[in-house]
Image: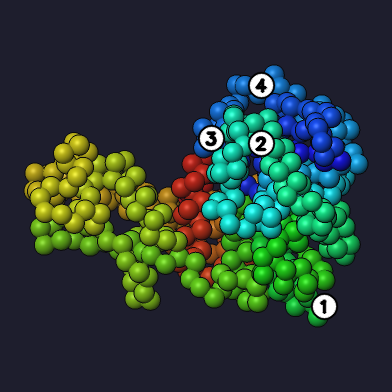
């Protein structure tokens, strides 16, 4: 007996997605014996590109049942069935994730029609569901909706079962429950890992740290490491014998601590310490005509930079944004190389600094605002965030425009007493990576609490 399933989801971060629609057809090898189709309220936002792809939006799901309300029906229709899907690892993972949230183990044997098609139909140009079924003459309606995709998968399975007369290949392709489960020692390690925000350390048998990471939910992230199929993930699974963790309460502290610990311990499976985390810098100077200009360049030790970036794409995207926000000229941002006025001039977004219509004095006032915006808000300041408990808060201290360190302090301490703070924080070396993390965090979190100590 087979249960052919297709799910549509919200999209988003791994293991944070939710199911928005499910369709299941129970099939005995000759005919459909039962079916279940339903929209599902995922209780989380849908990514815009997913809504455009599927046509399922949050308004449609407002009155739909939640997963726990349909869970019993899904269990019933799939019991004693092989779960079949086109890219079964995804649909099965989504169902298991939803059942895990309910505290229920959803274990089924699975069969993937992508893998089965590759075995039985080796000369097909594409194994994507839409192209595959069209090439086989199988009708497909309501593409990217659960019922339409699942119904087409039923017809595809019929064809594949007929092609594999002895069912030898099908039987080999069915993945048992045991083969999909994580080893018991890894499951135990996952269970011991708190579902909290912080930094986690994976240790080998000798106790050496082989990997350091940070996550808003350390248990979920460790589970992803132990469920991965890539070469690096498999090495980590083989070598890891213990896990230690440190809660931070604050995402910024987790970022800073992860960076500092990787620099200190240089774990074999972390790449961050092998390569520079930031690779481009925004340099600044004054042109012969007196205009403040900015230039993106590869980082070098002697360079002095207004701010830094991970990659060129993110840098260019941000600079285009700031060109509009501060009425800056694309040429003086080194983003437009052609002769004549910059492209923003014709759109009236540039006041003409590129062709001398705006004076250097007028233009440089705006350019200096960008410099102030990209730097720290104050030369001496504290960034305050949540602590590990309601009785404490986390702090990052910046003194004389340099990062001094971070830590956790009791709510009873006076944050504005800089001498007290120096004694309570963990010292941190001020460098480009540290400044990048803090500046990026402040740009993304507009409501971050900062206290001016001047």
Cβ–Cβ below 8 Å for labels 4 and 2? no
Residue 411 is marked as none
Q: Is residue 35 visible?
A: yes
Residue receiving disc 3: 53
Q: Residue at x 17, y 41 (%)?
A: 345
Viewer-closest of 131 and 214: 131
Vertical placement of residue 145 versus 412, above or below = above
Label 2 element class: helix
Q: Say which element carries label 3.
A: helix
Q: Which residue is mark 2?
A: 152
State the separation of the CA atoms marked 1 and 4: 50 Å
Residue 408 percent across, percent down from the top left: 67, 55
Total number of numbered discs in the rendering: 4
Dot 3 and dot 1 residues touching (CB under 8 Å): no
Mark 3 touches mark 4? (CB < 8 Å): no
Q: Residue furthest top?
A: 63
Q: Is residue 263 left or right of residue 220?
A: left
In the image, which is nearer the foreground, mark 2 or mark 1?
2
Q: Which residue is mark 4?
A: 62
Is there CB contact under 8 Å for labels 2 and 1?
A: no
> Of tags 3 and 4, which is closer to the observer?
3
Instruction: Provide residue 444's location: percent of width, then percent of height.
Output: 49, 46
- In the picture, the disc for residue 205 is 1
């Amino acid at each position: 007996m087979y249960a052919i399933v297709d799910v549509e989801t919200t999209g988003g971060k791994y293991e944070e997605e939710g199911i928005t629609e499910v369709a299941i057809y129970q099939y005995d090898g000759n005919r459909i014996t039962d079916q279940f189709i339903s929209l599902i309220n995922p209780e989380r936002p849908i990514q815009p590109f997913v809504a455009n792809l599927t046509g399922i939006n949050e308004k449609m799901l407002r009155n739909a049942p939640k997963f726990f309300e349909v869970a019993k029906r899904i269990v019933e229709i799939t019991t004693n069935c092989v779960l079949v899907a086109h890219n079964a690892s995804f649909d099965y993972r989504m169902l298991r994730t939803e059942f895990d949230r309910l505290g229920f183990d959803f274990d089924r044997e699975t069969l993937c029609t992508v893998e089965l098609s590759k075995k039985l139909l080796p000369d097909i140009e594409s194994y994507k569901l839409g192209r595959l079924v069209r090439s086989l003459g199988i009708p497909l309606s309501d593409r990217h909706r659960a019922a339409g995709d699942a119904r087409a998968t039923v017809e595809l399975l019929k064809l594949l079962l007929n092609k594999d007369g002895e069912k030898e290949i099908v039987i080999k392709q069915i993945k048992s429950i045991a083969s999909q489960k994580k080893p018991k020692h890894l499951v135990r390690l996952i269970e011991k890992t708190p579902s909290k925000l912080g930094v986690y350390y994976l240790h080998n048998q000798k106790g050496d740290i082989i990997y350091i990471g940070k996550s808003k939910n350390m248990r979920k992230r460790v589970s992803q490491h132990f469920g991965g199929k890539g070469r690096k993930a498999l090495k980590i699974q083989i070598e890891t014998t213990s896990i230690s963790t440190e809660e931070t309460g604050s995402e910024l502290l987790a970022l800073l601590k992860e960076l500092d610990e990787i620099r200190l311990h240089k774990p074999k499976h972390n790449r961050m310490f092998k390569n520079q985390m930031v690779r481009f810098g925004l340099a600044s100077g004054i042109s012969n005509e007196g205009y403040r200009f900015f230039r993106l360049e590869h980082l070098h030790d002697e360079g002095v930079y207004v701010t830094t970036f991970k990659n060129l794409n993110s840098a260019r995207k941000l600079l285009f944004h700031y060109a509009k926000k501060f009425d800056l000229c694309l040429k003086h941002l080194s983003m437009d190389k052609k002769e004549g006025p910059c492209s923003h001039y014709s759109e009236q977004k540039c006041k003409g600094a590129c062709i001398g219509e705006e004076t250097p004095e007028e233009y440089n006032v705006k350019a200096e605002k960008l410099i102030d915006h990209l730097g720290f808000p104050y030369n001496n300041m504290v960034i305050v965030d949540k602590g590990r408990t309601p009785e404490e808060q986390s702090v990052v201290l910046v003194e004389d425009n340099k990062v001094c360190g971070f830590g956790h302090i009791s709510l009873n301490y006076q944050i504005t007493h800089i001498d007290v703070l120096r004694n309570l924080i963990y010292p941190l070396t001020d460098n480009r990576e540290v400044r990048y993390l803090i500046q990026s965090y402040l740009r993304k979190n507009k409501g971050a609490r900062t206290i001016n100590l001047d």
